[in-house]
Amino acid sequence: MIKAFLLVAVVLDPPVLGRMARRLTPEPRVFQFEVDGVPVEMLRPPDDEPRPAWIFVNGAHPLRRREPVVWRLAQGLARAGYVVFVPDIPGLGDGTVTARTLDATGAVTAAACGRRDVRAGRVALVGASTGAGLALIAAGRPDLAERVSIVAAVAPFADLRKLICLTTTGYYEENGEFARYEVTDLHRQVVARSLVAAIPTQPERDRLLAALDEIERSELDPLDELPHRAHDSSPEARAVLEVLANRDPKRFGGLFDALPPSVHAFIGELSPLRFREGLRARIEICVPPSDVYFPPGEAAALAALPNARLTVTRTLDHTRPSLSLAHLRSFARFSGFVVRGLRAAG
């Protein structure tokens, strides 16, 4: 409970408790290094003893590990007695999730397990939004499954196929029905860039990614604009563009099936539910009652796993926690999520 109090106080940083938590705990030591070309920041208590470890995987955000709440989380975990690794996973800064994004997440996790700073060669993973899905995928890898104690997944996704349908058509498929759901500019950016990045031919892939750069600078909708700027495309690229241009959920299945095998493979590799048989770690999921990015069905699908527990709390606004006197019961649920995560990681 004390560790949870310190962590929450540093992350939320209320005027009195935040200062108190920082005064009562030693300043963490900070180290920087690279793993497979990925910059990693490590924070730890000022001693040299092996400690339980956390790896934080951020969402699709341009600031990445420099986002203030990410830094406060890393500081809070280190002040609570943990070693903390915060990598800049490639692709998350500009919303282009690729096979390299997946490989880098796994490489950082494996490297952390092998460090002398880390007690017993085991780590805990915490991810936010897209990073929560990546953390679950890493924990499901056969070479890492036994070395991950817990995945704390804040507002995760489960099935990329359903999110592509949602983003392109505005409808989410659940129990054989389509339900209308709001789509954001970030949805459009990440899905357009990630599907284009999976096109197998590099010159065409680079040309379309450059077109997306121009579209984003002009603040236009990539799903509407890109298909009009892709003349003389290959059959593989046309299949991707037809999915991006489609607005009819009933046509989505056929268009999706026509995607190139390499794109299908990528979508499967980026869907945490595909790895459910390999997930050995405890899974703690925390979501708001209504999330602007991922429908409730995504968290519910993951919560059905036998080693998973779902916490729904108004304390979260997507991935950012806040304290409100009007939602103290929700805050208590969020605190329980934090306590269970720290206990399992230790």
Image: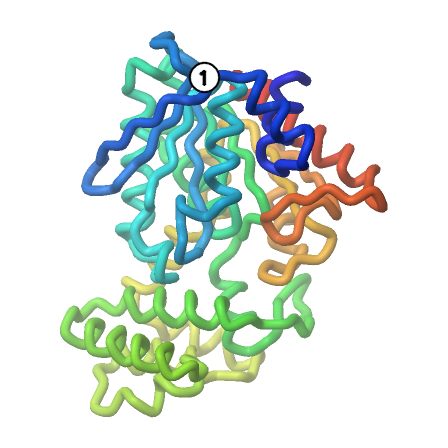
User: In the rendered view, would you say 286 is above or below 233?
Assistant: above
Task: Please name the residue shown 27% across and 36% down the image.
Answer: 107
* Above or below for 290 versus 180: above
Residue lying at the far left in this picture: please name it.
Answer: 203
Report if residue 203 is visible in the image: yes
Of residues 115 and 138, which is closer to you in this image? 115
Nearest to the observer: residue 328 or residue 36: 328
Residue 12, image x, y percentages: 63, 38
Q: Identify the secondary structure beneath mark 1.
A: strand
Asked whether residue 146 appears in the rendered view, the answer is no
Report x, y in % for residue 83. Answer: 41, 21
Q: Quadrant of residue 65?
A: top left
- According to the picture, the residue beneath numbered tag 1 turns out to be 52
Q: Indicate the colouring scheme.
A: rainbow
- Residue for point 63% across, 62% down: 292
**How many C-alpha atoms fall within 10 Å of the one at disc 1: few (<14), some, or many (≥20)?**
many
Question: In the rendered view of the protein, which quadrant contains the N terminus?
Answer: top right
Q: Is residue 326 left or right of residue 186?
A: right
Residue 239 vertical placement versus 115 (above, below): below
Quadrant for residue 105, please give it. Answer: top left
Q: Residue at x 66, y 63 (%)?
A: 174
Number of marks in picture:
1
> Which amino acid type corresponds to the residue marked 1 in the rendered image?
Pro
Residue 121: x %, y % from top left: 36, 16
Name the spot of residue 196 as percent of width and height, x first: 31, 71
Residue at figure coordinates x 42%, y 16% from the top left? 45
